[in-house]
Amino acid sequence: MFSTNERGQVGIGTLIVFIAMVLVAAIASGVLITTAGQLQSQASQTGEETTSQVSDVLRITDIIGSVNSTGNNTEIETLKVKIRLASGADSVEMNESSYTIATMGDRNSATVVSGNETTTGLSYNQSQGLDDGETTLTEQNQVIIAVFKLHKISDIDTLAADDRVSISIEAPAGGRTVTEKQAPGQLEDGSSYVLR
């Protein structure tokens, strides 16, 4: 039957190797679990930021230019930009946005303007669905008007007849919208025009 003359023995060396293998496996699994948790957290944060950049976008619906004559120049000095949330966008605080304005004509100029109301030459008018002084767009039906007094903003020119203007608005999360319009061929002092 079975022989009992031979017995298996476990030496101290084998026991030490076994314990070392268990310890190495425990440490490796701990590192893997920690790394997986960090990667998951980082991926989640990156996903949220990317979603915000894509979805938190402001939409420019109209740009109205108001004409003023100074000396021999009859030019658009004030732009009223109607802004609302794009579809699916979360709330956007307009004071945390920024604008890039470029004028193109006989003279070309461009500048970046902080969306903060304290910026010289910029103010907000609450148009639809907002209380006086409110500057946070929270719903799709709300409209705010950003008023740019071009002659008061440094490094930007007023618009002559047929000049083009490009306005880029960037939400705090990074979503960007660019709109380009052209002034009419004839400008009359004191008139306002929807730029096309």
Image (cartoon, rainbow, N blue to C red):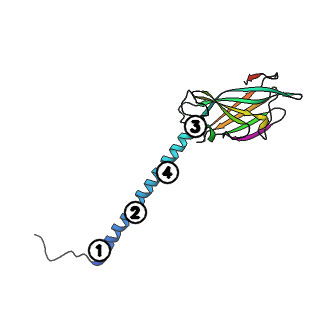
**Residue 114 drawn in magenta:** yes
Type of amino acid at the residue the image marks with label 2? Ala
Mark number, residue 42:
4
Q: Give above or below for 53 relative to 87.
A: below
Of all residues shown, which one is farthest toward the right? Answer: 72
Label 3 secondary element: strand
Q: Give above or below for 42 relative to 50.
A: below
Ranked by sequence position, the earlier of labels 4 and 1 is: 1
Q: Which residue is mark 2?
A: 28
Mark number, residue 15:
1
Label 4 secondary element: helix
* Pair 2/3: label in front: 3
Q: Give above or below for 100 relative to 131.
A: below
Q: CA distance from mark 4 to mark 1?
A: 41 Å
Residue 28, image x and y in percent? 40, 63
**Residue 168 drawn in magenta:** no
Q: CA distance from mark 4 to mark 3?
A: 24 Å
* Pair 4/1: label in front: 4
Type of amino acid at the residue the image marks with label 1? Leu
Label 2 secondary element: helix
Type of amino acid at the residue the image marks with label 4? Gln
10 Å crowding of disc 4: few (<14), some (14-19), many (20+)? few
Quadrant hosting residue 125: top right
Q: Magenta span covers which residues?
A: 106-118
Q: CA distance from mark 2 to mark 1?
A: 20 Å
Contact? badges 2 and 3 (CB < 8 Å): no
